[in-house]
C-alpha cells in the first residue's frame, strides 16, 4: 500500500475533526493554541515538531497552552514527547496534480518513496493542496504532526516553499532546481538532459528541431527551463542561432497535446521533436501515426521520462531516462538526515541523465 492515512478529516476552513459514531467532534485548533500562548501559528507548529528555533520560554508557554486547551495533533501526545511521529508527508502541489495523475513517472517515484520509507520504519501520508488556499494550508500540514515533507514537483514561484520554510519543518523538493542556498532538493540534471538530447539530434544532421515542453496553468516548470538552457547550449556549439519559435509550450493533458502536435504539422514539418514528458510523448506518437507520418523516417522523436514506459511503444522511443528508484531512495534518505539533524547532510543531489537510443531516431 503506497499511502497510509490517519482517521482525520481535513477541513480547509481551519478545523480538524475526528469521525466517531457518525458524528464529527470539533477539536481545538492550532489557531486557538497560538492565541492562548500569545504567539503565532508558525511558532506553535515549530514547538509541535520539536524545532530548535523556539526559545525555552516560548516553548513552555505553547506547551502549557496545549495542555490547558487539550489540543492534540493527529499523531497523539506521544509525538509531542518523543518529537517523532514516524510519518513523512508526501505533498503534491496544486500546480502539479494533473501531471501526477497522468504521468507514469510519478507513480513510479511514489512507489519507490513508499517502499524506502517503510524499510526505514516510516509511514507515508499523501497530501494534495487542490482547492486549498496557501494561507490556511500551513494549518492543515501542521496538524498531521509529520516529521518532514517530500514535495513532488513545483513551479519556481510555488508558495509552498515559503510555507514550509516558515513552519521550521524539514523538507525536500523533488524535480525542483533552485539557486537558493537554503533549499533542499533532489533533482534530475535537466540541463544536461536537454543538452545531450539536442546534441544527439544535431549529430544526426537534424536542423529543424522543436523542443515541446508542457506548462502548468501557463507556467513553465523549473526543470523545463533547465532543459531549454541545455538545448540552447547544444545549438550554440553548432553555431545555430536560437529562436523562440524552437520551443513550444503545450498544456500537459493528452487531448490538448494531441491537438497541439496535429496543428503543428499542419503548419510546418520539423525533422525532430524533443518531448518533455510521457503524456506529451504518447500524444505526439498518436497524432503523428494518425496523420500517416512515419517515425523515424519522416520525423525523429526523443522523450524525457520513465525509460521502461517507452520500451513498449511502437516504435520504442529514444529516451532521456530517469532512475525513479534512485530518486525515491535519495529523497527519503536526504529527508531523514535532515530530520535527524545531521550537520553534513547534503542540500542538493542531482541525478545524471542517460540517453537510451531506440527506434524513434535516425539520421536526417
Image (spheres, rainbow, N blue to C red):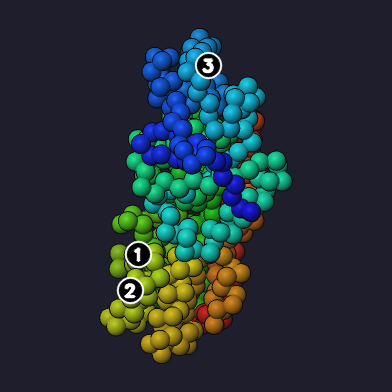
Which of the 4 quarters of the picture holds residue 313? bottom right
Q: Is residue 292 visible?
A: yes
At which x and y percent is residue 265? 33, 81
Residue at 56% in and 41% down? 6
Label 2: how many Cα within 10 Å (few below 14, some 14–19, many 20+)? many
Q: Nearer the viewer, residue 65 or 355?
A: 65
Circle nearer the viewer, 1 or 3: 3
Q: Residue furthest bottom?
A: 292
Q: Residue furthest top?
A: 57
| Label 1 SS | strand
In this figure, which residue is indicated by the disc labeled 1?
A: 251
At which x and y percent is residue 207? 40, 76
- Labelled pair 1, 3 in contact (Cβ < 8 Å): no
Q: Is residue 289 left or right of residue 67?
A: left
Label 1: how many Cα within 10 Å (few below 14, some 14–19, many 20+)? some
Q: Is residue 317 left or right of residue 94?
A: right
In this figure, which residue is indicated by the disc labeled 3?
A: 67
Amino acid at each position: 500500500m503506497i499511502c497510509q492515512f490517519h482517521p482525520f478529516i481535513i477541513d480547509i476552513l481551519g478545523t480538524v475533526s475526528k469521525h466517531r459514531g457518525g458524528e464529527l467532534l470539533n477539536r481545538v485548533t492550532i489557531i486557538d493554541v497560538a492565541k492562548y500562548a500569545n504567539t503565532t501559528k508558525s511558532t506553535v507548529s515549530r514547538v509541535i515538531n520539536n524545532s530548535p528555533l523556539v526559545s525555552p520560554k516560548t516553548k513552555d508557554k505553547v506547551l502549557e497552552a496545549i495542555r490547558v486547551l487539550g489540543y492534540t495533533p493527529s499523531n497523539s501526545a506521544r509525538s509531542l514527547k518523543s518529537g517523532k511521529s514516524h510519518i513523512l508527508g508526501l505533498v503534491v502541489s496544486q500546480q502539479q496534480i494533473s501531471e501526477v495523475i497522468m504521468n507514469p513517472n510519478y507513480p513510479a517515484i511514489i512507489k519507490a518513496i513508499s517502499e524506502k520509507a517503510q524499510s526505514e520504519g516510516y509511514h507515508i501520508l499523501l497530501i494534495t493542496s487542490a482547492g486549498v488556499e496557501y494561507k490556511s494550508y500551513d494549518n492543515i500540514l501542521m496538524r498531521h504532526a509529520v516529521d518532514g515533507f517530500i514535495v513532488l514537483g513545483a513551479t519556481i514561484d510555488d508558495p509552498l516553499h515559503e510555507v514550509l520554510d516558515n513552519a521550521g519543518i524539514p523538507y525536500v523538493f523533488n524535480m525542483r532546481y533552485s539557486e537558493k542556498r537554503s533549499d533542499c532538493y533532489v533533482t534530475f540534471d535537466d540541463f544536461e538532459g536537454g543538452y545531450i538530447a539536442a546534441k544527439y539530434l544535431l549529430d544526426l544532421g537534424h536542423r529543424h528541431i522543436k523542443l515541446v515542453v508542457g506548462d502548468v496553468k501557463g507556467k513553465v516548470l523549473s526543470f523545463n527551463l533547465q532543459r531549454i538552457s541545455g538545448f540552447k547550449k547544444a545549438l550554440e556549439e553548432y553555431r545555430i542561432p536560437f529562436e523562440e519559435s524552437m520551443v513550444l509550450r503545450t498544456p500537459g493533458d493528452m487531448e490538448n497535446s494531441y491537438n497541439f502536435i496535429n496543428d503543428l504539422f499542419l503548419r510546418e514539418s520539423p525533422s525532430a521533436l524533443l518531448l518533455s514528458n510521457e503524456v506529451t510523448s504518447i500524444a505526439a506518437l498518436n497524432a503523428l501515426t494518425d496523420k500517416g507520418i512515419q517515425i523515424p523516417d519522416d520525423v525523429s522523436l526523443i522523450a524525457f521520462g520513465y525509460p521502461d514506459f517507452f520500451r513498449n511503444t511502437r516504435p520504442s522511443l529514444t529516451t532521456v531516462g530517469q532512475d525513479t528508484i534512485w530518486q525515491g531512495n535519495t529523497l527519503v534518505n536526504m529527508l531523514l538526515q535532515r530530520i535527524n539533524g545531521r550537520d553534513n547532510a547534503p542540500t542538493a543531489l542531482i541525478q545524471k541523465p542517460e540517453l537510451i537510443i531506440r527506434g524513434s531516431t535516425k539520421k536526417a
